[in-house]
Structures are given as C-alpha cells and as structure tokens.
Amino acid sequence: MSLDIISIDRVRASPPRVTPLTEPFWTSLAQGEFKVTHCKTCGQMSFPPRRFCRHCWSGDTEWRTMSGKGRLYSHTYIHALPELFAGEPAPLHVGIVDLDEGVRIALPIVGDVDTLDVPIELVVLAYKDGPLFGARPVDNA
Ligand SMILES: [Zn+2]
C-alpha cells in the first residue's frame, strides 16, 4: 500500500543531504514508500538508514518497506521558528511516532491532535524540490 502524497507549494527549508546510502530511501519516498534498513543478522530495524546495524554492528542489512501505520508517542508546537524555517507556517507541529514495525521516528505532524497514542499514518510531503515525510492522525471513527 502506497502512502498518500501531499503537494506543498514551497521548497524544503532544510533539504536532506542525499548520499549513496540514503538515495534508495529518498527515491522510494518520492514514490510513496517509507523504507528502513533491516538487519538480517539480528532482525532489528534502523532509521535513519545505516550501512551497519546499530544494534549488533552487522553489515548484512537490507531495505524493508514499512506499512506507514503507527501511533503518536509525543508531539509539540514550535512557535518561535529558527531562521532557517522562516518560510514555514508557524507554529510548526512536530512529533515522535512509533511505527507498528517498532521503529521510532521524529517528523512533522500534519493536522491537529489533542491526545497522545492516537493512530497515525505516514504521508509524503511533496515539496517543489523533493520529498520529505510526515504523519497525520488517522480518522478511526
Ligand atoms: Zn543487527
């Protein structure tokens, strides 16, 4: 299942530095897939992607696509934005989510939430110069 893609009519305030290691992540993200590195030795997953497993230091890793489903662990609103983010609408809503596969990620939150531990889904934020990722609450009514 592919992630929803939300068009944003701005360029990214702080574009990622794409390396040979992270290029597959960004290419997949632009197509609606969120991938992490999975260790074939110990079975743990790492994000951001790593050449060596951060749990057991094995170099035997592979890409694995996440479902995009998870729960909100924490979130906050940043009212005083750093100068780098001056072009972004304030306040900036950011949070930490736990994906169902067990990976914890910090990212922007799209939409409002008033409680923790609500179900979320990852979304692709398609800026004019490339993708970023975010999460939004799932309407589970
Ligand atoms: Zn490992």
Image: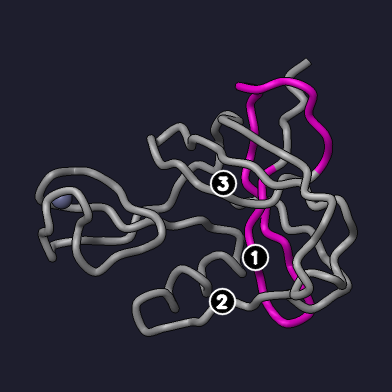
Do residues under tags 1 and 3 come within 8 Å of each other at their CB atoms? no
Magenta stretch bounds: 111-135
Of the numbered discs in the image, which one, if any, rests on residue 132?
Answer: 1
Seen in the picture, residue 65 relative to 67 is either above or below; the reply is below
The dominant secondary structure in magenta is strand
**Residue 119: within the magenta?**
yes
Mark 1 or mark 3: name the one nearer the start of the chain: 3
Circle 1: residue type:
Leu
Name the mark nearer the viewer: 1 or 3.
Answer: 1
Tell me the residue at 54%/33% (across/down).
Answer: 70
Mark 1 burial class by Cα count in 10 Å: few <14, some 14-19, many 20+: some
Circle 3: residue type:
Met
- Label 3 and label 2: CA atoms lie apart by 25 Å
Q: Position of residue 48 (x, y in %)?
A: 41, 60
Circle 2: residue type:
Pro
User: In the image shown, does 106 or 124 lie closer to the viewer?
Assistant: 106
Tell me the residue at 55%/36% (across/down).
Answer: 69
Seen in the picture, residue 12 relative to 32 is either above or below; the reply is below
Mark 1 or mark 2: name the one nearer the start of the chain: 2
Residue denoted by label 2: 16
Q: Residue furthest top?
A: 141
Tell me the residue at 74%/68% (across/down).
Answer: 126
Q: Is mark 3 within 8 Å of ligand 1?
A: no
Query: Which element type, helix, strand or loop, lies under badge 3?
Result: loop
Do residues under tags 1 and 2 come within 8 Å of each other at their CB atoms? yes
Q: In the picture, which quadrant includes the C terminus?
A: top right
Residue denoted by label 3: 1
What colour-coding does the image apply?
A: one colour
Name the mark nearer the viewer: 3 or 2.
Answer: 2
Mark 3 or mark 2: name the one nearer the start of the chain: 3
- Label 1 and label 2: CA atoms lie apart by 9 Å
Asked where in the image residue 115 lies, by quadrant, the reply is top right
